[in-house]
Image (cartoon, grey):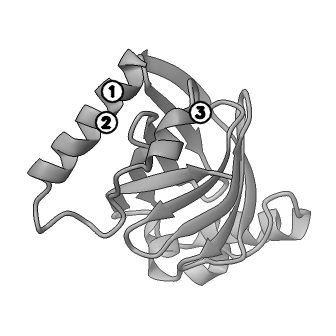
Amino acid sequence: MVRLLHLELVSETLRTVSKPTTQVCCRIPTKKELTNMLTSILGARLSWHFANGWVFEPAIVGPDIVDYTLKEGPHAGRHAIQHFYFQRVAPGVETTVWYEESGALVHITWYLETQTTHRFAALPAWLAEDMTVYRGDNQDPAFIEKIRKLSSTKQDWPRHILNDEGYFKVI
């Protein structure tokens, strides 16, 4: 009960101090979501959103993999299973980081109480130039061959940096 009251106070504080420049993806969890708060991102099945229109659904976070499908965004239709490194940095704050077949490096910080995320990713220049080439399934050998060819023949630098906020819902 005390934890729920604390979470309600946190929600009210966030509503009070939010700025008009807050990104569209930022949100305050509902009472139901607070009651069903995750104790870890591991094992969760999510609908995961970023301000620039990216929607990963479903995104399933296993003990050492994330299995996601990009439902909306620059390379909608992509399905991938990525092996990640995990760390709990504080109660309610966890991180995952992985290296993709394109050479992209992705780091996610998960804030479980607010159901928000911070993404830092460094994408190869060739991928940032045309994200549609990333549509496909990284479990398909033909797709992997196509990406390896692009990464060996196209320019890697300068890296395109994604440094943004998002949110997730448990589904």
The x and y percentages for residue 123 are: 46, 60
29 above or below 48?
above
Q: CA distance from mark 1 to mark 2?
A: 5 Å
Residue 55: x %, y % from top left: 56, 68
Q: Is residue 107 visible?
A: no
* Circle 1 SS class: helix
Q: Are marks 3 and 2 in contact (CB under 8 Å)?
A: no
Disc 3 or disc 1, which is closer to the eye? 1
Q: Which residue is mark 2?
A: 8
The alpha-carbon separation of the residues under discs 3 and 1 comes to 22 Å
Label 2: state its secondary structure.
helix
Task: Determine crowd level at label 1: few under 14, some 14-19, many 20+ residues with C-alpha closer than 10 A.
Answer: few
- Residue at 73% in and 27% down: 63
Q: Dot 2, how many residues are within 10 Å of its Cα: few (below 14), some (14-19), or many (20+)?
A: some
Comes first in the chain, label 3 or label 2: 2
Q: Do tag 1 and tag 2 residues touch (Cβ < 8 Å)?
A: yes
- Around disc 3, counting alpha carbons within 10 Å, would you say few (fewer than 14), some (14 to 19), or many (20 or more)? many
Q: Where the N terminus falls, by quadrant?
A: top left
Q: Quadrant of residue 78?
A: bottom right
Task: Residue 153: give x, y in percent of width and height.
Answer: 60, 71
Q: Mark 3 vs mark 2: give the one in front.
A: 2
Sooner in the amino-acid sequence: mark 3 or mark 1: 1
Q: Which residue is mark 3?
A: 41
Residue drawn 41% across the image and 46% down it? 117
Give the residue drawn at x 41%, y 49%. 29
What amino acid type is highlighted by mark number 1?
Leu
| Secondary structure under the numbered disc 3 in the rendered image | loop
Residue 51 can be seen in this image? yes
Which circle marks residue 5 in the picture?
Answer: 1
Identify which amino acid the numbered label 2 is placed on: Glu
Q: Which mark is residue 143?
A: none
Q: CA distance from mark 3 to mark 2?
A: 21 Å
